[in-house]
Image (cartoon, rainbow, N blue to C red):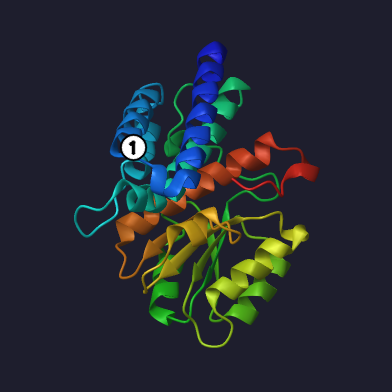
Amino acid sequence: MTIEAAELLAEAEALQQMVTALGKAGSETTAGDLEQLDLRGEEFAKGLADEDRAIFLLYWRKKRPGGPVSPQVQIRFRAPFMAGALRDAMALLEARRDGIIGESLGVQSSPVASRRRERPLILIIDDEVDLRQIVKSCGSKWGCDVIEAGGGVSGIQMALEHHPDLIILDVIMPGMGGLEVLKWLRSEPSLGEPAVLLLTAVPVDPQELIGGELQASDYLEKPLTLSCLAGRVKRLLYLESLRRDVLPPDSRSVAL
């Protein structure tokens, strides 16, 4: 098991280098380059547990909407999703390699309790009261506690006071917007870089949100379905719980 996980980690690192190289290549990226990358990623996914494979491929196969585009445009859109899928897979494989979890790496087997509390804590920062109430009502079903804030400033105050495991953050809010809040959160070392799920009702650049300096953990476009939100929440909490268990206390500011 340890050998298999180590081999998969090595392949994930190689794929990560390929994604980075193609993303930087820009106008030199060809359809053949993308095809080779896709095939290698599909082969890598065969070594993951069933549920983790499904999640990995969901992000790995994500294509730019709107019909055929050039390989250069496609890789620019897909690179952040591919990098995120590999980053998550590597966190799971490191936990398997180190014996923290067994072969089954699905959400159902996750060590959801952090070392600081019995249940994961979610903070939702959104000016839509209805959405905040929906998330709060779903907290018990997800095995979580949920606290809420209706704006950016109050959200930062809640984050500093409670140190949540996951922050669900609306991008467009009156006053201090979500991206401003995210920049502040990422600049505050005492928070240890919690997972942040952005919600947006406007078109966004995945490279800016996930692959750029903002370093969001993931994002969802509004209007969103409850099942999709639940899936992202469980996935991010699982990865956050692994990160907190794998990393020593003075290293927990490392991003997922």
Q: Is residue 177 above or below residue 230?
A: below
Q: Secondary structure at mark 1?
A: helix
Quarter of the picture containing the C terminus is top right
Left or right: residue 214 versus residue 253 is: left
Left or right: residue 38 versus residue 160 is: left
Q: Residue at x 36, y 49 (%)?
A: 72
In the picture as drawn, the residue positioned furthest to the front comes out as 28
In the picture as drawn, the residue positioned furthest to the right comes out as 250
Q: Residue at x 76, y 43 (%)?
A: 251
Residue 102 in sight in this render? no
Q: Position of residue 55 (x, y in %)?
A: 37, 40
Q: Position of residue 2 (x, y in %)?
A: 57, 14
Q: Residue at x 54, y 58 (%)?
A: 216
Q: Position of residue 217 (x, y in %)?
A: 52, 54
In the picture as drawn, the residue positioned furthest to the left comes out as 67
Q: Is residue 255 above or below residue 154?
A: above
Q: Residue at x 30, y 33 (%)?
A: 32
Amino acid, disc 1: Leu
